[in-house]
Amino acid sequence: MKNVSFFLFAIFVFIACKKQDKTETQLEKEPRVVWQPYDEAADLAATEMLEQTRMHLKLINSKVLDKNDIWKTLEPELDFFSEEKYNDLKKFILEKNIPTIQQQIKDGKLTYEELTLFYIYRIRKYESDNALSLNSVISLNPKVVEQARDLDKMDKKNIDINSIFGMPILLKDNIGTKDMVTTAGAVALQNNKSKSAFITERLLDKNALILGKANLSEWAYFLCSGCPVGYSAIGGQTLNPYGRMVFETGGSSSGSGVAVAANFCVAAIGTETSGSILSPSSQNSVVGLKPTIGVLSRTGIVPISSTLDTPGPMTKSVIDNAILLNAVIGKDDNDVISKAIDINFMDSIKEGSLKEKRFGVIKELLEDSIYKIAVEKIKKAGGEIIEIEPERVQLPGFLSILNIDMKNDLPVYISTQSGSDITVKNIKDAIVFNQQDSIKRIPYGQQLFEGILADSTTTEELNVIKENLKTIARNYFDTHIDKHQLDVILSINNYHAGYAAVAKYPALTVPMGYTGKGEPKGLTFIAKPFSEALLLQLGYAYEQATKERKEPANYMD
């Protein structure tokens, strides 16, 4: 027995030494990457020369978060993931859609663990480089590699290639995730250990991998007035991969759009109140869907407006958008507007065709050459083009919807969803908290927060505003949709997001092309409520006919 014990002990020591040797050797080959702060003065000065006034930046990197902390807990996993391995996997992952990646995993060319490590490695690779960093990610899930390994142990034979199973997804950091903090980019919520949002639970139920949290315009861009889109105190200034410190990222789902565009994840989820999915999707050449209010639950998401808020998928392709939408639909009894949707959006896009569909084309927008070319391509594919001239109308009282809803909705979120460490209870508390260190917490001010307190609109007055705006906006679209029996109206980027928001109409933006300077633009399809299947069908048909999306040039390695 003594000899046996000695033998087993010797085997254990041998294995331990071999593991230690391997680790040391690996570390010698792949030294840990460390992000180094740098003097931002020259970069900040350069933004003063830009035409886009909101790009005049005061800072680039967060003064609150050390970037090294983003991937710190996952460094031991990356010690065994080499640059050579990363390069070997690129052909299986970069710019590939979900069905293609799933099929390669089923074929044994790739594992869920390798897929996950690839994205973590890639995020660290670019975000640690001060010449290429995009500030698109606020945090990574420390358990995600372990969770990916667990999925690799399962039989992959019956996994649907059109499913979200094992796909690493980034969530905008106003969407609750139980094992991670949910900050909305704000120092006041830096330690917010919230409950998981309903849509997060839907993803987990389908074995998706929550890779981490994406940066955003702080408080979903309802904090400061005229400040840069894509900035948050926690995440710093999100930058556009197609023109770093040249083009805006769009907001407020800035990090979600940038991360998808730069291939930092398979897909992401953003949120929109008015343009916050459509804008960053268009600006970063990705597909973004703003669903009808009620298609997706808002429970567990830091709110602006219970009237207008909705999450939505942001992806590199329409197929992936449909797959992600399938994964998160479901009636939520805790969200009074939530609907039961019984549609397989992946199946519906296969019926997509531009032929004989009727498109309302806004005559004024035909002055944009990229939009005009897109319209001509639709016409060539058999679509019927009807030029329309919507009457320009104002949306009086729009801001009051946001003001009064956030004044009421934020305290409800904090009392029911946030962690116990959160000391602010309402907007007034948040204003006072920010004033205690304004340089670090609100470098661009908090004019919109202050406007919330100043708005004295009553509940009765607000209800009148909501109904009035819904009528105005629906008439804006329906006058032409009904008269000409249109399937959709075509817009650019988030140009008509405000109208779609108060009308509660869904909208889908698909990459449409690039300006002479290389700035992306999106073709935006707008239709009547609960027309998501139609939008995805037409978006897919347009995407297949044009294939406009291009990988950002400096992020192809």
Image (cartoon, rainbow, N blue to C red):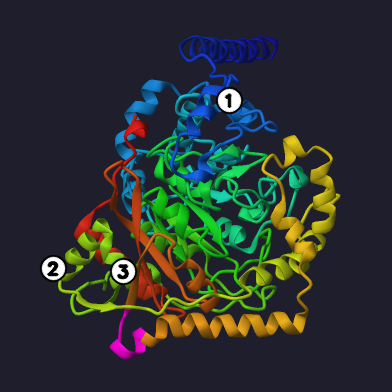
Dot 1 lies on which element? Answer: helix
Q: Which residue is mark 3?
A: 364
C-alpha span from label 1 to label 2: 52 Å
Q: Is residue 75 left or right of residue 335?
A: left
Mark 1 vs mark 2: in front: 2
Q: Which residue is mark 1?
A: 75
The amino acid type, in three-letter code, at marker 2 is Lys
- 484 inside magenta stretch: yes
Q: Residues within 10 Å of mark 1 (few under 14, many from 20)?
A: some
Where 478 sits versus 129, above or below?
A: below
Dot 2 lies on which element? Answer: helix
C-alpha span from label 3 to label 2: 21 Å
| Residue at image point 22% right, 72% down | 354
- Magenta region: which residues? 480-487
- 356 inside magenta stretch: no
Residue 347: tell me if it is visible. no
The amino acid type, in three-letter code, at marker 3 is Glu
Q: Which residue is mark 2?
A: 380
Residue 43 vs residue 429, the one in the foreground: 43
